[in-house]
Amino acid sequence: MHPIEQALIFAINKYPHTPLVIAYSGGVDSQVLLHTLASLKQKSLFSNPIRVCHVNHGLSENAEQWQAFAKQQCLHVSLPITVCQVNIQAQAQQSLEALAREARYQALQSISTEASVIITGHHCDDQAETFLLALKRGSGLKGLAAMAAETKQGKNLLVRPLLNISRAQIVDYANAHDLTWVEDESNKDTRFDRNFIRNEVMPTLTKRWLGIVTTINRSSDHCRDGQLLLDELAREDLKVCQHELDSLLVSELSQLSVARFNNLIRYFLALRQCLMPSTEQLTQLQQQLNANEDKNPAVKVGRHFFRRYKSALYLTADFDDISDWQIEFEGDLFKESSLNEKRLVELPDNLGALQIFATHQAQSKNIESKGVDNKGLDSKESLLVLPTKAQKVTLRFSHDNPTCLPDYRHHSRSLKKVLQELNIPPWQRKRMPFLYYDDVLVAVVGYFVCQAFMAKVSSPQASLPQAPPSLKIIWTA
């Protein structure tokens, strides 16, 4: 049995009956992959159902011809094919190669609703190129580990069974079986880093050291082993440093060496599929741990922020400024004749939605009072008196620091002080809905109701309403 066939059988037999998705471009690597798997399937050497996926990036004038070729080849080997059209938009600080790769992997994951094994034709020459690209970027062990033989991607598993097979072996197999394939003209364009390495760097290295691809792959394996050890250490450190789901304890982080701190932060971000920080960002982040207690420093990493508040370091999104957002209602919208007619208000910047409606269900057990951080909250209710017909009802995310008397307090205090005593982080204070009747603060939705506007409650045992209708607001985050 040919080494390519052996590698594929070994990989597939670990996942019997699991659907296979072949990543097929029409190039020689994927053509050999398609031909070999179809041949093995015909010989009943595995029982997994197979589907082929061809991604049309639309980046070449030959894209439609390649798509037609892909359909023809799948028809020839009697395998079903799905063609995915993707539209790649140029983005700042993102290479076209990276954008195309990301679009391709998303397309591969989208074609099946059930968990599948996605198989690609990456080989050891690809692995060596990936290692050198990572070296050029100054990557650590994780980057230098290059491509793993198996990678979990959502519900699917991405498998690269040919990483020990050379490009020469693949071409020899293709020629021996009289296979035809397409040649992407962009593969010769050395403006792209990978093509420069493939066409200029690797031939020079191979001329000097014949076995350089094998030794680079060996180094990549060593880096992968080293990264596994670092991940083990990070898991142990995370057990000690974890505060909440997306936060870490400053006191414990401060006890770590610089190397262990950096390793833990990278691991913490990787678990959440965030972009990795630069060395400068990690240095800045560690310095901010020692900021004064009354300071709330923030360090931007990719599309997220690390924010220190009191004794913890929180990871948050890069929030939009929503201070100017507001919506107005007329008071008569909440009249008694409109009982239980819900109005849905979509909140900005992924904050969820509010349901607002008049109701007779003003029972004491339904009233929520104490302020609670709504992060991770499924829903939170507020009950308050109905506005009059003349009152303007406004929902907004800004305030002028009014004096207020929350439902749980005995004395009035400024709103800023109330939010501080509730231990609500500063960034969350800008992301909570404030409800006003005219220009008077009525409630901080999901946190508290001002006492003057608390709904009159009836006994939970009463068979009929004992109190006038109240306004119910449910915040679903």
Image (spheres, rainbow, N blue to C red):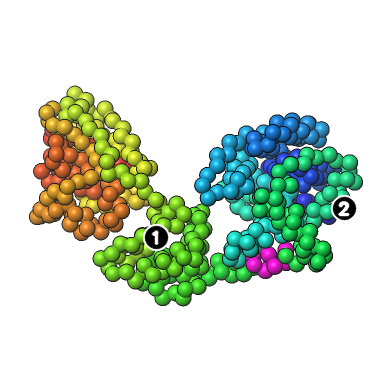
| Magenta segment boundaries in residue numbering | 217-224
* Residue 61 in view, yes or no: yes
Q: Residue at x 58, y 39 (%)?
A: 88
The total of numbered circles placed on residues is: 2
Amino acid marked by disc 1: Val
Looking at the picture, tell me which residue is in the foreground, 162 or 322. 322
Q: Residue at x 36, y 69 (%)?
A: 289
In the depicted structure, whether residue 139 falls above or below residue 191: below
- The percent position of residue 3, horizontal first and vertical second, equals 83, 55
- Return the residue at label 2: 1
- Return the residue at label 1: 299
- The percent position of residue 82, horizontal first and vertical second, equals 67, 34
Q: Residue at x 16, y 50 (%)?
A: 401
Callout 2 crowding tier (Cα within 10 Å): few <14, some 14–19, many ≥20: few
In this rendering, position of residue 113 left or right of residue 125: left
Q: Residue 223: within the magenta?
A: yes
Looking at the picture, tell me which residue is in the foreground, 264 or 1. 264
Quarter of the rendering containing residue 54 = top right
In the depicted structure, whether residue 418 falls above or below residue 205: above
Earlier in the chain: of badge 1 and badge 2, it is 2
Amino acid marked by disc 2: Met
- Looking at the rendering, in which quadrant would you find the C terminus? top left
Q: Residue 102: within the magenta?
A: no
Callout 1 crowding tier (Cα within 10 Å): few <14, some 14–19, many ≥20: some
Looking at the picture, tell me which residue is in the foreground, 396 or 91. 91
